[in-house]
Image (cartoon, rainbow, N blue to C red):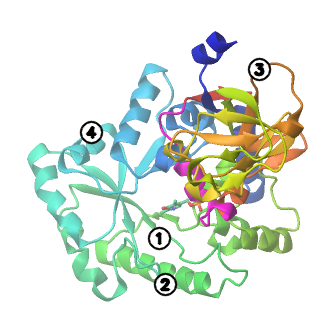
């Protein structure tokens, strides 16, 4: 038994391919045929693993959004190796000088988010390449984006170098679609976007239509007027609602909101299982004391792996479909769980730390509540060292 536990991975993440595909199909149904579906695979596909998620979803998408150019290069490489049609890849984050040249050569689109991008002119000129770009407009988030007041002068470097820049789209990002059930601020951003988008075309002297994209998952579900050329779907692709507010609003607005199926299950095999007598203290700080004889399982996961320390004394895991409380503190590489009620035979057991099994569910939202954060942070901070395995 011990041998087997050492050979197998002690902790791993299962990625459901069918859930990913169904989520995409459900979004397509909701958005209709005239809106393009873009998937956001930033943050190692929201912690689900870019290398596992991309091959499953690639053929269903119109475009893929990333933060890091390195991720885009990996996808291009994967496409070539596997003879797949090249998808539109859009890098939304900071791009280094050398990477920007490779983006241009590989047909990877980049997002220019402010006047600092004018420095790219000399690199493109020197390398004699043309860069496909989207222009990010700051309509109210105050993060990336050209601002309204200086738009014309800030875009002058693009107008003066139309040979170097192939402007394909304008984009923006909402500040407040998921935290509210009223979309007044988002509607103001939409109006700003329309106005600024028109100005971009005027300043650059473009007559052809530009791709327009502003909405992420929440907007796709609660703000139909934000469905412009393309939607950038992140969290929803992974079967997770952006927020409770979005879930409630979507029900009211769409009547039949899409079903989102969680994609990720985090599992762990016990390292050791034993009985400890009534009165025993458990873990660092002796914060827990057993008031009866207790069967405990030690699992080799901890805050190093992305199981937040704030779950100490709050969380439970699922063993044999039974909720089993985490006793005492979450440690760097261990948690100790009361498995007395889990009634399993043998000397080890398997726990679900996050995810759904049959009628029991440990959603990322619940872990996030326990850990005083949001589910986006829970999934993206799962250790990159944990193996991700694609299952049906
Ligand atoms: C993260 C991100 C998205 C996706 O947001 P979700 O809420 O996960 O759908 C879309 N656009 C931009 C610019 C982002 O940074």
Question: Which residue is denoted by mark 2 in the rendering?
Answer: 192
Foreground: disc 2 or disc 3:
3
Circles 4, 3 touching at the beta carbon (< 8 Å): no
| Marks 4 and 1, how far apart at CA | 25 Å
Q: Is mark 2 on a helix, strand or loop?
A: helix
Structural crowding at the residue carrying mark 4, measured as other residues with C-alpha within 10 Å and reported as few (<14), some (14–19) or many (≥20): some
Foreground: disc 4 or disc 1:
1
Q: What element carries label 3?
A: loop
N-terminal label among 4 and 2: 4
Question: Which residue is denoted by mark 1 in the rendering?
Answer: 172
N-terminal label among 3 and 1: 1
Structural crowding at the residue carrying mark 3, measured as other residues with C-alpha within 10 Å and reported as few (<14), some (14–19) or many (≥20): few
The quadrant where ligand 1 appears is bottom right
Q: Is residue 33 magenta?
A: no
Q: In this view, does 373 lie above or below 33?
A: below
User: Does residue 30 appear left or right of residue 138 in this picture?
Assistant: right
N-terminal label among 4 and 1: 4
N-terminal label among 2 and 1: 1
């Amino acid at each position: 038994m011990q041998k087997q536990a050492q050979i197998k991975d002690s902790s791993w993440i299962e990625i459901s391919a069918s859930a990913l595909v169904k989520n995409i199909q459900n979004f397509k149904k909701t958005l209709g045929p005239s809106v393009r579906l873009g998937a956001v695979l930033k943050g190692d596909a929201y912690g689900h693993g870019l290398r596992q998620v991309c091959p499953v979803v690639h053929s269903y998408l119109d475009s893929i959004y990333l933060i890091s150019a390195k991720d885009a290069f990996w996808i291009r490489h994967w496409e070539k190796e596997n003879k797949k049609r090249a998808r539109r890849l859009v890098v939304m984050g900071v791009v280094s000088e050398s990477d920007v040249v490779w983006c241009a050569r590989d047909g990877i689109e980049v997002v220019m988010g402010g006047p600092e991008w004018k420095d790219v002119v000399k690199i493109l000129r020197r390398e004699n390449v043309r860069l496909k770009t989207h222009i990010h407009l700051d309509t109210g988030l105050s993060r990336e984006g050209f601002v309204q007041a200086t738009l014309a002068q800030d875009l002058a470097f693009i107008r003066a170098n139309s040979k170097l820049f192939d402007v394909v789209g304008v984009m923006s990002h909402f500040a407040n679609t998921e935290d509210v059930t009223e979309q007044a601020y988002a509607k103001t951003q939409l109006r700003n976007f329309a106005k600024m988008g028109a100005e971009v075309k005027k300043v650059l002297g473009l007559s052809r239509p530009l791709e327009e994209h502003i909405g992420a998952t929440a907007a796709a579900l609660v703000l139909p007027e934000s469905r412009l050329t393309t939607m950038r779907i992140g969290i929803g692709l992974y079967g997770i609602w952006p927020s409770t507010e979005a879930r409630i609003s979507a029900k009211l607005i769409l009547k039949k909101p899409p079903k989102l199926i969680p994609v990720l299950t985090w599992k762990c095999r016990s390292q050791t299982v034993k009985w400890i007598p009534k009165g025993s203290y458990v873990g660092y700080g002796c914060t827990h004391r057993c008031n009866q004889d207790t069967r405990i399982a030690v699992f080799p996961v901890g805050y190093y792996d992305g199981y937040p320390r704030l779950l100490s004394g709050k969380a439970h895991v699922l063993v044999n479909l039974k909720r089993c409380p985490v006793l005492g503190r979450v440690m760097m590489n261990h948690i100790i769980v009361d498995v007395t009620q889990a009634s399993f035979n043998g000397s080890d057991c398997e726990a679900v730390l996050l995810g759904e099994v049959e009628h029991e569910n440990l959603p990322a939202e619940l872990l996030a509540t326990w850990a005083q954060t949001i589910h986006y942070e829970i999934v993206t901070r799962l250790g990159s060292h944990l193996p991700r395995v694609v299952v049906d």
